[in-house]
Image (cartoon, grey):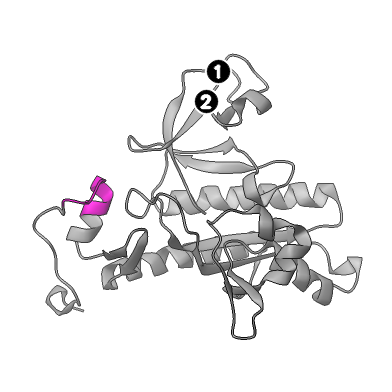
Amino acid sequence: MRFSQLFGRTLRERRADIESASHDLLERACYVRQHTAGIYTFLTLGLLSLRKIERIIREEMAAAGALEILMPVVHDAEVWKQTGRYDAIDATMVRFKDRRDRDCLLGMTHEEIVASLAATELRSYRDLDVVVYQIQTKFRDEARSRGGLLRTREFLMKDAYSLHLTDDGLATAYEAQAAAYHRIFRRVGLHDVAMVESATGLMGGRRAHEFMCFLDVGEDTVVVCERCGFAANREVVAATASCRGSSPAVPAARHRG
């Protein structure tokens, strides 16, 4: 493929509405085009890069023992009503009615779908443990999209879900997924990445971590202890810190898996 044959063109000047340097470079180099706030078209070069990242993720997920599936974008709201999250989530989740007047929504996460699948597909405790994942387009109507691709409303997301018979099995799978993420970051060239304690948020659960890539344009803050290595998002550090010798906060940008 010749560069002169690409669909689209490079841009000489920065658009006035672009905030970040990374967004500016992606637009000017003919990787992406903004459709509207938080929604982008990936042009040929951008799509090639995206597919390469997907390939790396798939290889590392397979090495960690995860099985790929693909779940629906549109969900019947009934399964969400059973868990109580249909009414608990704000306008970030897009709700609508189909032509049969049934409540539906655009899936912003898939715990409910995985649980319903488990009810039909897992017949015995012998079917456990299992880890499934997907790479799928998601839509969350964020109140404020910013930073180009750093915080968008429509995005391609890899999300994994596991089901286990014991807490030990869960812990083993959690560690395997964390190790896979570290390998993925190294392979895509992100080396200054930290795994830090975070709030469980809308996903719930007893414990959560997020990966932080340290950048000057970050919007989250990480507190790191130079003595014991403890690291956490500032939002949860007061509740989770096991050491009081924390260093000054360091700005970081949140990574979406």
Q: Which mark is residue 246?
A: 1
Q: Which residue is drawn at 65% across and 43% down?
A: 200
Q: In which quarter of the image is residue 70?
A: bottom right
Secondary structure at numbered mark 2: strand
Q: Which mark is residue 197?
A: none
Residue 10 is situated, as x and y percent measured from the top left of the image, at 14, 65
Q: Number of labelled discs?
A: 2
In the rendered image, is residue 2 in sight? yes
Q: Does the magenta stretch include residue 19?
A: yes
Q: How crowded is mark 1: few (under 14 residues within 10 Å), some or many (20 or more)?
A: some
Which region of the structure is painted magenta? 16-24
Of the image marks 1 and 2, the number of the one nearer the N terminus: 2
Task: Check contact, mark 1 vs mark 2: CB within 8 A.
Answer: yes
The residue that appears at 50% across and 18% down in the rendered structure is 247
Residue 244 screen position, x and y as percent:
62, 15
Report x, y in % for residue 250: 43, 27
Q: Using a 10 Å C-alpha cutoff, classify the residue at mark 2 as few (fewer than 14 neighbours), some (14 to 19) or many (20 or more).
A: many
Q: What element carries label 1?
A: loop
Residue kind at label 2, given as amino acid type: Val
Check the picture and name the quadrant holding the N terminus: bottom left
**Residue farthest along the left direction in this orientation:** 12
* Residue 162 as seen in the image, left or right of residue 226: right
The image quadrant that residue 155 belongs to is bottom left
**Residue drawn 76% across the image and 73% down it:** 117
- The numbered dot on residue 223 is 2
Q: Which residue reaches farthest top? A: 245
Q: Which amino acid does label 1 sit on?
A: Ser
